Amino acid sequence: MMFKKPKGTRDFTPIEMKKRRIIENKLRTVFDSYNFKEINTPTFESFELLSKKTGEDIRKQLFVFKDHGNREMGLRPELTSSVVRFYINELKNLPKPLKLYYFANCFRYENPQAGRYREFWQMGCELIGSKYPIADAEIINLAMDGLNKINMDYEINIGHLGVLKGIFKEFELSEDEELKIRRLIDKEDYEGLENYLSELKSSDELKDIIFKILNSKGDKSVIPDLKEVLKDYPTSIEALNNLEEILEFVKHDNIVINFGIARGLDYYTGMVFEIYGKREGARQVCGGGRYDNLIELFGEQPTPAVGFAYGFDRVMLNIDDFEVEDESILIIPIKKDKKLLKECLNIADKLRKSGKSVEVDLMNRKLNKALNYANTVGINKVIIVGEKELSEGKVSLKNMKTGEQELVGLEDL
RNA sequence: GCCGGGGUAGGGUAGUGGCUAUCCUGGGGGACUGUGGAUCCCCUGACCCGGGUUCAAUUCCCGGUCCCGGCCCCA
């Protein structure tokens, strides 16, 4: 074989594409129903933009290249940076809230494993301009409604970075220390966390508080208890109040409060959430949260924003497989003379204009072979065009499922 | 970047240090000249790549690559 597809990429068969489109369209209707508006941005951006919120280290996880003008470019690893750039370039003067969504392929230079590819699809949204809890809630509700729409079983965990940040502030931890702690929390490496915390000054109290926060996991009722524990940490209390307000507007009840969600890197500022499916190895299907500092980081005046993205491929892995079938028609001339063939094309043209999915035999097949073909590819109806019937203005319409066949006037097709 | 398991026609497989590499399925054509799912026949089409060992490698060894999965990481 001469060519193979690049590592970590996939070809999608017609059946796979059909299924992906069905799911995509269902999710799309939910975004539309919240009156989010679809946008698109370039597949590649300047490396500088892509590395802005994470730093140079990101390079090894990006597809980076230089264009002919020696400008350094990268394939987008996600859409948030691009959307924010677009917002700052052109959309910042639109009325708020700005509600945007996208469905796009993204690229990360990583080793493939279950549910991880070098090219993958994200469907997500950004709600820009509202700092209010109801905006956070709308994002959570939208994320859950989408998955409900496609009947996916999931678990959602919601946290708030302000709680831990309030603690870090009181204990005056350095940025490095804070980052290291968040990494360990995100990984759920509690043993490593305990060891690390033991090394720090004021370790006992800090350790005690952090583990109390991490253990506050469950339904909404954990919040009042945690407030009591954290009553001396005003920033944390503020965060808990914020989270409580948000949850008042979240319409689904099956949520888990979990302050262990540290969401990878640092641009989230408030509420954060993750959604998990059931499949082992590719469980996380969605992540999101509030990022009120990012737009400012990109050089615009401070603007609150909140959003999420589905990992579309993981969504596909976490739903039950389903059958797809399409309504299609094959038109077969009984003989291969030009007049009959042209008549076939005329009929096809008419049916196509009325929205039907129509094939004309292109293989010069004899009738029995053509029927055989129709049968194996799952064509529902066959129109047989013969001279005798045609002279009376009729054709044979055959239902491939039932085998029934009837003469139909050309006008009645 | 690291680790484990794999790689034989489009899909699924058998097998071997040597002879025309097995079978099923799929695809094209025919038997069948105006009615499908059957049967028969013909055609199509593969040992991942490179190096080594050997008289001889698809087979054994090494390296690479890709796939599956696990770490690291995951904006």
Image: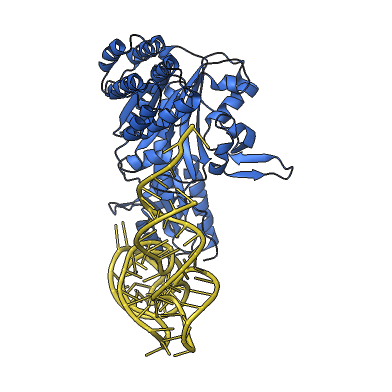
In the figure, A282 relative to B14: above or below? Answer: above
Q: Nearer the viewer, residue A386 or A63?
A: A63
Q: Nearer the viewer, residue B45 or A282?
A: A282
Q: Quadrant of residue A162?
A: top left
Identify the residue at horizontal 45%, vertical 64% (top origin): A365
Identify the residue at horizontal 36%, vertical 41% (top origin): A282
**Along the horizontal axis of the image, is A410 left or right of A260?**
right
Can residue A223 be seen in this snapshot? yes
Identify the residue at horizontal 26%, vertical 20% (top origin): A219
Spot occupied by residue A1 in the image (x, y as percentages of width and height): 51, 66
Spot occupied by residue A221 in the image (x, y as percentages of width and height): 25, 15
In the figure, A140 relative to A12: above or below? Answer: above
Q: Nearer the viewer, residue A253 or A342?
A: A253
Q: Quadrant of residue A191?
A: top left
The extreme right residue here reads A69
**Along the horizontal axis of the image, is A349 left or right of A73?**
left
Q: How is the image coloured?
A: by chain
Can residue A263 be seen in this snapshot? no
Q: Nearer the viewer, residue A205 or A10?
A: A205
**Chain A, hue in figure:** blue
- Total labels: the figure holds 0
Q: Quadrant of the C terminus of chain A?
A: top left
**Chain B, hue in figure:** yellow
Spot occupied by residue B70 in the image (x, y as percentages of width and height): 35, 47
Spot occupied by residue A20 in the image (x, y as percentages of width and height): 41, 42
